[in-house]
Image: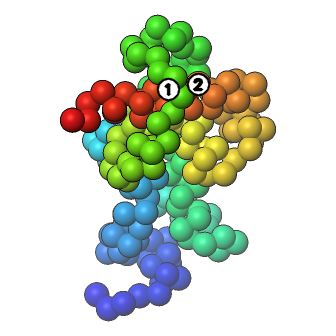
Amino acid sequence: MKDFTEQEIILGCVKEDSRFQRLLFDKYYSKMFAICIRFSKNEDEAKDILQEGFIKAFEGIKRFKSESSLNTWLSRIMVNHAIDYLKARNKNMFSSMSENALLIPDSSGLDEELANDLSPEEAMNLLQQLPDGYRTIVNLYAFEGLSHKQISENLGISEGTSKSQLSKARTFLKKLVNNLNTYVV
């Protein structure tokens, strides 16, 4: 197939032409997978979210109005689907966790030098170790740029819960980063 414009790909997807759906999938796979992996615990879960997210996109592409970029529209679908996926899997995603549940020794302060030396893979691994609720809040706040008010509206939680989960996530991440010192030889 020759090179098609984004508009031609969209029109082909609207007509449910599998060739154009494949082009869309291939074009946006990496960007959308990066979103899904941030919200998931592992690659398999991210692939499930990604596949289901693309199915939703193909079903809804008739309603795409080009008011935003296709990338933005697909990103929103992936984020929303990831949240729905996690909510369905874990009804108590935003319940309070006790410090004992963290199973990580307490440390005094974050080792900033070690945190700055993390590779993208190590940072992603740490993010994936967060409990679902913490990871979801971190993603929405830090990566998607949502305010606590927007997060509370999207997730059906209070702003206080959003703030609390972010604070607990930061503490959890600090402990994970500091814990890396224990394993560095």
Point 49% across, 42% down: residue: 112
> Would you name the residue on which mark 2 appears?
168
Q: Can see residue 134?
A: no
**Is 33 located above or below residue 98 in the figure?**
below
- Residue that extends furthest to the left in the rendered view of this protein: 185
In the rendered image, residue 184, in percent from the top left (x then y), is placed at 26, 35
State the quadrant of the N terminus. bottom left
Toward the viewer: 175 or 96? 175
Label 2 neighbour load within 10 Å: few <14, some 14-19, many 20+: some
Q: Is residue 51 shown left or right of residue 95?
A: left
In the figure, residue 128 lies in which quadrant?
top left
* Picture residue at 41% right of the left edge, 55% below the top: 34
Q: Secondary structure at mark 1?
A: helix
Kindly check if marks 2 and 1 are in contact, taking CB atoms under 8 A apart as contact: yes
Tell me where residue 2 appears, x and y as whole percent.
32, 91
Q: Position of residue 56 (x, y in %)?
A: 48, 52
From the viewer's side, name the closer residue of 47 and 23: 47
Position in image of residue 144 (x %, y %): 61, 51
Residue 172's disc is: 1
Residue 63 falls left or right of residue 157: left
Q: Amino acid at mark 1?
A: Phe
Which residue type carries mark 2?
Answer: Lys
Residue found 33% across the figure and 70% down from its top: 26
Q: Report the front residue among 33 and 10.
A: 33
The coloring applied to the image is: rainbow
Would you say residue 139 is visible in this rendering? yes
Instruction: Give the quarter of the figure containing the C terminus.
Output: top left
